[in-house]
Amino acid sequence: MVIKQQQQMHPADIMVVTIAHLLKDNEKVFHGVSSQLPMVAILLAKAMHAKELTYLNIPGGVNPLAQQLSPYSSAGHEQYTRSEAVFPLEEIFDLSMRGELDVAFLSGVQFDVHGNVNASVIGDYHKPKVRLPGGAGSAVLIPTVKRALIWRSKHDPRTFVEKVNFVTTRGNIDRIITPLAVFKFQDGRLQLEAISPLTTMEEVVAQTGFSVNTDNVDVLPMPTAEEMRLIQKIDKDGVRYKEF
């Protein structure tokens, strides 16, 4: 990935703010392991406009009050020991299947124009070039959650493809957020909704392996000084940069 303009702002900061603004007050929001960017974004949303958002995580914590975020995982004891309540992982799946989980943060390795997600294999399923971890919880949550928000720190033609090598899951994908752009699933396909202020439309088109609409596409705003102040207070050690 090449960022065309030299800016002090890091793509992770723009992604965190973009994700935070997609969350609404009073929603029930869940993230799993290796989810540092969504973790920071959820905490930012709660500090700004969504103070009554219910934050659920994979260790089972509800609205944890961690003083310091783990640099290694979004599923550490920090996300459990100082929580308002305990809500075990198996209850998350039940909540989603009852239609009561508003947002789940999930990811994958390949995404295609039709919103299919591959987290299983690269290449032929029976003789793969790479065997991936598989769907795990995403195979249940993406089809059942009200809104699946996907984030990915890489944006290239191997990630965004015309057709995934294997459909691990599909379902209620709302948006996919990357360092370059935001895609919205609409009218049966991924539509380019906005691009990062650190890139160009030409780069987004070149780094996407399927045809991209270029009309009516917004440019994401830079984080405000207040948003950056809150991010730095929440994430003193920069765990949001770990995926880059």
Image: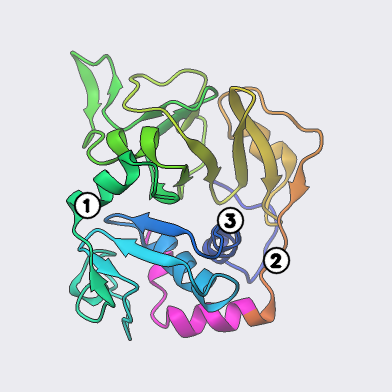
Q: Is residue 58 visible?
A: yes
Residue 142 occupies quadrant: top left
Question: Which residue is nearer to you in this view: 53 or 9?
Answer: 53
Q: Percent x, y for residue 55? A: 38, 66
The answer to which of 187 and 101 lies nearer the viewer is 101
Compared to 96, does 19 lie above or below?
below
Q: Is residue 76 left or right of residue 43?
A: left
In the image, what residue type sits under mark 2?
Met
Image quarter in which the C terminus is found: bottom left
Alpha-carbon neighbours of circle 3 within 10 Å: few (<14), some, or many (≥20)? some
- At a point 42% along the width and 75% down the height, the residue shown is 238
The percent coordinates of residue 185 (x first, y second) are: 58, 33
User: Residue type at mark 1?
Assistant: Glu
Q: Which label's residue is closer to the chain start, 2 or 3?
A: 3
Res 91 label: 1
- Marks 2/3 in contact by CB < 8 Å: the verdict is no
Span shown in magenta: 227-244
What's the mark number on residue 22? 3
The quadrant holding residue 67 is: bottom left
Helix, strand or loop at mark 1 = helix
Q: Residue at x 73, y 40 (%)?
A: 201
Q: Are marks 2 and 1 in contact (CB under 8 Å)?
A: no
Residue 222, which numbered label? Answer: 2
Residue at screen point 52% across, 78% down: 47
Residue 244 seen anywhere in this rendered image of the structure: no
Q: x%, y% of residue 78?
A: 24, 76
Separation of disc 2 and disc 1 at Cα? 37 Å
Q: Is residue 190 left or right of residue 135?
A: right
